[in-house]
Image (cartoon, rainbow, N blue to C red):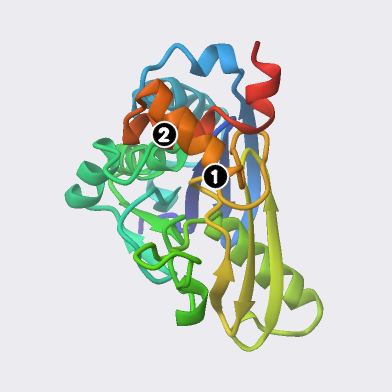
Amino acid sequence: MTMHPKRDVVIVINPGSTSSKIALFKAGKMVAERTLNHSLAELSQFDAVIAQKDFRMQAIQEFLADQDFSASEVLAVAGRGGLLKPIPGGTYAVNEAMLDDLTAAKRNEHASNLGAGLAQQVADQYGVKAYVVDPPVVDELQPLARISGLKGIERHSAAHVLNQKAMARQVLATMGKTYATSRVIVAHIGGGLSIHAHENGRMIDGNNGIDGEGPYSPERAGSLPLVDFVAKVLAERLTLAQVKKLLASQSGLRSYLND
């Protein structure tokens, strides 16, 4: 009788604004990981984030080639979710509609838009399904948190949801508590910053850390003097796409140190 290996290997891909992280999990435990940091010079050669896909895939393939597992052991591939329409937290199967939205960057440019496509390409390689988990667009704000201070403009959530929820679950577990029944405040500190209040498994209030709200960060603008910023937009005749890119990836510390 031929014994077939158990399918218990999950490949995880997390593209960030300044790095690509790849990990291998077996039976629920991480057995290998690699972080590849990307310099500004490397990434600036690409006109759009989605154009980085082949560049990032090379690092993923090099990592996989170094690992000791067979294709028949792979259960699934998980990628970081991108900027889709607002959805509740959870796990979603990658499909063509999702890939089309992310490729077109319909809701803004961000490194997370690469996650689903990279995961799908690797999943196809092993003949399994690809998923994204807790995308940045998870929006669970309570009604009061949507009030912005100006009628007609409503606040919405876009944050480092995957990391926030994962860290909350991990820390609460060490305290003998569950994420679904706890209230915590979580801060993600990276290329962007997002700080949220979590209540019973939902992110009920916090800043839009993807678009650049809140504190400034290595790449995000944070809160700005509004009149001065509007004057800059008008004087330079910036388009909405240019404004989004400026606030989300060309501001913060980068704007001071990039000269």
> Amino acid type of disc 2?
Val
**Direction right: furthest residue:** 175
* Identity of the residue drawn at 58% across and 17% down: 40
Residue highlighted by disc 1: 226
From the top left corner, tell me how far across and down residue 156 is, in percent. 43, 63
Choose top left, top right, bottom left or bottom right for residue 241: top left
Q: Nearer the viewer, residue 123 or 9?
A: 123
Neighbours of disc 2 within 10 Å: few (<14), some (14-19), many (20+) = few
Label 1: which secondary element: helix
Reading the chain from its start, which is encountered first: label 1 or label 2? 1
From the top left corner, tell me how far across and down residue 26 is, in percent. 57, 55
Q: Is residue 235 left or right of residue 127?
A: right
Q: CA distance from mark 1 to mark 2?
A: 13 Å
Label 2: which secondary element: helix
Residue highlighted by disc 2: 243
Choose top left, top right, bottom left or bottom right for residue 21: top right
* Identity of the residue drawn at 38% across and 62% down: 153
> Amino acid type of disc 1?
Leu
